[in-house]
Image (cartoon, rainbow, N blue to C red):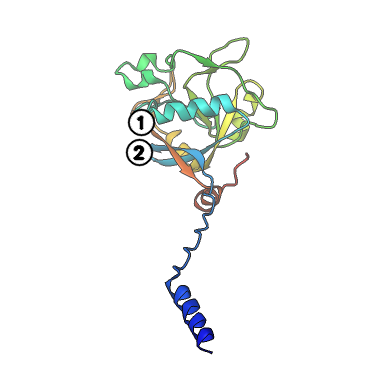
Amino acid sequence: MKTKLFLLLVIVSITACKKEEPKEEIKSDPIPTEKIIEIKTQYGDMYIWLYKATPLHRDNFLKLASEDYYDSTTFHRIISGFMIQGGDPNSKDTDPNNDGQGGPGYTIPAEIRDTIKHERGALAAARTNNPTKASSGSQFYICHSTSGTASLNGNYTVYGMVMKGIEVVDSVVIQPKKTSNNRPFTDIKMDVNVLEKTLAEIKAEYGYEPKL
């Protein structure tokens, strides 16, 4: 009897001294985010989705935006019912006559997709006349009207869409301008940023379901 009691006490003692094993922490995978573009102007802000179906244009825009390349450039050409154009580094200087002629010194191969059309709010690459339809390295335009820009389908690369803030285009496009070159009399400057949002945040904040 004494032996059994002794063994019971030993077992109880060992159990009491045994440290509780720490519980393994369960880590959940982070929710992936997407890079989007924010364009801030004195008339409001626009938020733009860049299509992954046009990776060269998408990557180039993200690169330039992350380097603050577009900051303080202007929308130097505006045509109601058509589009607003910007992204030229020349628009930052004091010579309005060289606007539309500048860029980073390279072009981007065309990524024209039959399934991506010019429509209201579409972001597309400006370009000079060239046989391969290569795009400007930085200049872009945002469509003000679907009907007014439909004739550009198949000739210019469309690579994004305004998810929120299309009313900014409506405000910009009606500003007083010089009729000879459609340049606004007052500079309409932009501040361009790269933001990261989850798909759920994009839908909740901008009411947009991205075309991946």
The residue identified by callout 2 is 42
Q: For label 2, count other residues whose C-alpha is less than 10 Å away and answer few (under 14), some (14-19) or many (20+).
A: few
* Quarter of the image where one finds residue 178: top left
| Residue that appears at 33% across and 22% down | 92
Quick one: 98 or 9, which is closer to the camera? 9
User: In the picture, residue 123 is in which quadrant?
Assistant: top right
Would you place residue 142 above or below residue 13 in this image?
Answer: above
Residue placed farthest to the bottom in the image?
Answer: 1
**Is residue 33 visible to the viewer in this orientation of the structure?**
yes
Q: State the image coordinates of residue 184 (x, y, percent, origin top left).
A: 38, 27
Mark 1: few, some, or many residues within 10 Å (few <14, many ≥20)? many
157 above or below 7?
above
Dot 1 amino acid type = Lys
- Name the kind of residue labelled 2 in the image: Gln
**How far across and down, in percent of the image, does residue 155 sit?**
63, 20
- The foreground one among 171 and 75 is 75
In x, y percent, where is residue 21?
Answer: 48, 64
- Asked if the residue under mark 2 is in contact with the one under mark 1, i.e. CB atoms within 8 Å, the reply is yes
Instruction: Residue 78: tell me if it is visible.
Output: no
Q: In the structure shown, which secondary structural element does the residue marked by tag 1 occupy?
A: loop
Give how far across and how far down residue 201 sits, in percent: 51, 51
C-alpha separation, residue under disc 1 versus residue under disc 2: 7 Å
Residue named by callout 1: 189
Displayed quadrant of residue 188 = top left
| Residue depicted at x 63% and y 40% | 211
Helix, strand, or loop for circle 2?
loop
Counting labels gives 2
